[in-house]
């Protein structure tokens, strides 16, 4: 009497012929690295804007903004924090941060690709192993 488990055990005990290939990464294309880092930076910019929005909505919904408004008006005679910190101002600040991050991450991707291409001349590259089943 043969069960499915017995069949699977026999199947897994067979040796599979797999070919191993070792490749050396000796060059990273500059424009490919720039494009990839730009796409990653766009994703980070979207996450930044959404997180700024959500943090503002949570702070506003929990009443922390009102308490901070009372605290600031107690210190600075009659000054209102809510007049300076509103949803448009928070989203504008978040947009500026996202744009700066976009520029920085894209430039860093290009710099890392250039540094790797220079380091390959000294080290010979990164050795990567692959197998095929």
Image (tube, rainbow, N blue to C red):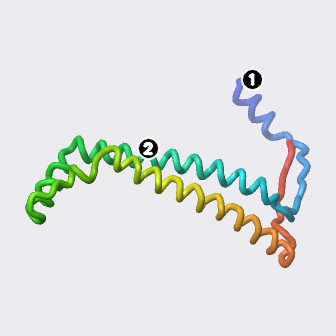
Nearer the observer: mark 2 or 1; the answer is 2
- Hey, which quadrant is residue 60 in on the image? top left
* Mark 2 / mark 1, whichever is N-terminal: 1
122 horizontally vs 37: left or right = right
Specify whether 61 is left or right of 111. Answer: left
Taking the spot 47% from the left edge, 56% from the top edge, the residue there is: 97
Residue closer to the observer: 96 or 63: 96
Q: Residue furthest bottom?
A: 122
Whether residue 115 is situated above or below residue 1 in the rendered picture = below
Relative to the observer, which residue lies in front, 28 or 124?
Answer: 28
Mark 2, residue position = 50
Q: Horizontal and vertical percent for residue 70?
A: 11, 55
Q: Is residue 15 above or below residue 111?
A: above
Where does the N terminus fall, quadrant-wise?
top right
**Residue 44 location (% of width, % of height):** 54, 50
Residue displayed at 87% across by 72% down? 124
**Rendered residue at 75%/64% (across/down):** 113
């Amino acid at each position: 009497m043969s069960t499915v488990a017995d069949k699977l055990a026999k199947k897994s005990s067979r040796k599979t012929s797999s070919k191993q290939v070792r490749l050396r990464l000796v060059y990273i294309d500059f424009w490919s690295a720039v494009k990839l880092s730009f796409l990653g930076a766009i994703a980070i910019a979207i996450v930044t804007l959404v997180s700024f929005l959500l943090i503002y909505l949570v702070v506003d919904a929990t009443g922390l903004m009102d308490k901070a408004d009372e605290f600031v008006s107690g210190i600075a005679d009659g000054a209102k924090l809510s007049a300076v910190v509103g949803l448009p101002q928070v989203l504008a600040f978040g947009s500026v941060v996202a744009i700066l991050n976009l520029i920085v991450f894209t430039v860093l991707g290009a710099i890392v690709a250039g540094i790797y291409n220079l380091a390959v001349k000294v080290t010979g590259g990164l050795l990567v192993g692959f197998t095929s089943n």
